[in-house]
Image (spheres, rainbow, N blue to C red):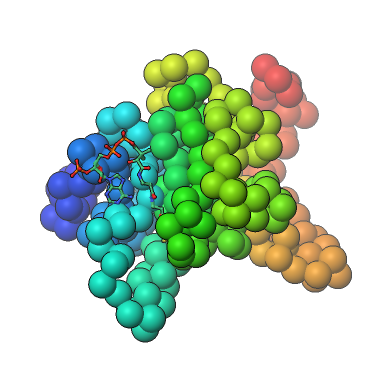
Amino acid sequence: MYKELFHSFLPQTLQVEIQDEILMIGLNRPEKRNAFNDELILGIEKIFENLPSSIRCVIIYGIGDHFSAGLDLSELKERNAVQGIHHSRMWHRALDKVQFGTAPVIAVLHGAVVGGGLELAAACHIRISEPNTFYALPEGQRGIFVGGGASVRLPKLIGIARMTDMMLTGRVYKAEEGERIGLAQYLVAVGEGLTKGKELAQKIAKNAEMTNYALMHVLPRIVDSSQTEGLLLESLMAAISQSSPEAKQRLNDFLEGRAKKVGE
Ligand code: 1HE
C-alpha cells in the first residue's frame, strides 16, 4: 500500500522498496551517473514529506557504478541569479527534510560522491562507504559554488580547512582517507554497503523513538547554539527522555538483567 503511495508521485529515477520498518531509496539514473535533475531532488523531498509513521529508518543508495555525480550540469547553464537562488533554496528545503524528518537516514556510498551527491550524503545521519568511493566538490573547477547545503554541513564533518582545500584545488578523497577524516563513519568491503546499512537500520529501528528524535532534531540544534543555551537544551532533552514510559521500561530491563550489556 505504501509502495503504491510512493509510486503515485515518484519519478522513474527513484526506486523505493519497503522491508519491514526500513525504506530503501535507490537513486536510479545510472546512465547519467545519478546526476540530480530537479525531478530527482523534488522526488526525494516528496518521499520524506510522505514518510509513513511505520518507517523507522531510511537507506539511500545509488544504482549503477556511482552514488551520485551531483547536480545535473545540463540544467544549470541557462539560469539567471534569481532562478539560481530559488534552485539552491529548493535543494535546502529537500535536504532539510532528509536531515530533519521522522526517521534517521543512512547513506550507502560507492563510486562518485561528488558535488550535490556529497551534499545529500552530508544531510544523512550515517554514511557507509565501499572501497571504490571517492569524494569531491568539483564546483570549484566548474566556476560555481556549492548550493545544496555543503557550506553548512560539510565543515561540521571534516572542518572548514578541508572543505576549502577540496574546492580550491579539486582535491579528491578516496574511500580510506574519507573514512579517516569523517566523510563516512564506516568503510566496508566491496558490495557489502547495503548489508551493513540494513544491519545498522535494524538496530536504529529498535531504539526508543524519543532517542532517535533527540539525535536527529535536538543534537544538531545544540551544536548550533551557544554553550549556555546548548547545556540547557541538553538538560531539557535528558529530562524529557528519562520520563518516557519506554525509557523506564528499558532501565528496569537492564537493572533486572533482561537487557543486553554494552557490546553484546
Ligand atoms: C552528467 C553529470 C552531471 C555525468 N551532470 N550529466 N558534478 C560534476 O562536476 C561531476 C561530473 N561528472 C564526472 O566527473 C563523471 O561523470 C564521473 C566521475 C561522476 C563518472 O565518470 P564516468 O566515466 O563513469 O561517466 P561519464 O562518461 O563522465 O558520464 C556518463 C554520462 O553521464 C555522460 O552523458 P552522455 O550523454 O555523454 O552519456 C555525462 O555527461 C553524464 N553526466 N555527470 C550532467 N553532473 C546543489 S548544487 C550542487 C552543485 C554540483 O553538484 S556541481 C558538481 C557537478
Does residue 125 appear in this view? no
Does residue 256 appear in this view? yes
Query: Residue pushed farthest right?
Result: 228
Query: Is 24 left or right of 223, judged from the image as shown?
Result: left
**The N terminus lies in quadrant:** top left
Question: Residue 39 appears in which quarter of the rendering?
Answer: bottom left
Query: Is 44 left or right of 125, judged from the image as shown?
Result: left
Q: Nearer the viewer, residue 11 or 84?
A: 84
The vertical placement of 126 against 89, above or below, is: above
Q: Residue at point 24% right, 37% down?
A: 30
Q: How many marks?
A: 0
Where in the figure is residue 3, as x and y percent of width and height? Answer: 19, 44
Where in the figure is residue 113, as x and y percent of width and height? Answer: 45, 41
Q: Nearer the viewer, residue 76 or 264?
A: 76
Q: Residue at point 79% right, 65% down?
A: 230
Question: Residue 174 appears in which quarter of the rendering?
Answer: top right
Where in the figure is residue 135, as x and y percent of width and height? Answer: 51, 39
Query: Is 130 left or right of 20, judged from the image as shown?
Result: right
Query: Residue pushed farthest bottom?
Result: 82
Locate ligand 1 by image quadrant: top left
**The C terminus lies in quadrant:** top right
Q: Nearer the viewer, residue 28 or 124?
A: 28
Q: Residue at point 25% right, 58% down?
A: 74
The vertical placement of 212 against 109, above or below, is: below
Where in the figure is residue 168, as x and y percent of width and height? Answer: 60, 54
Q: Residue at point 45% right, 34% down?
A: 109
Q: Nearer the viewer, residue 241 or 27?
A: 27
The vertical placement of 73 against 121, above or below, is: below
Query: Is 100 left or right of 259, judged from the image as shown?
Result: left
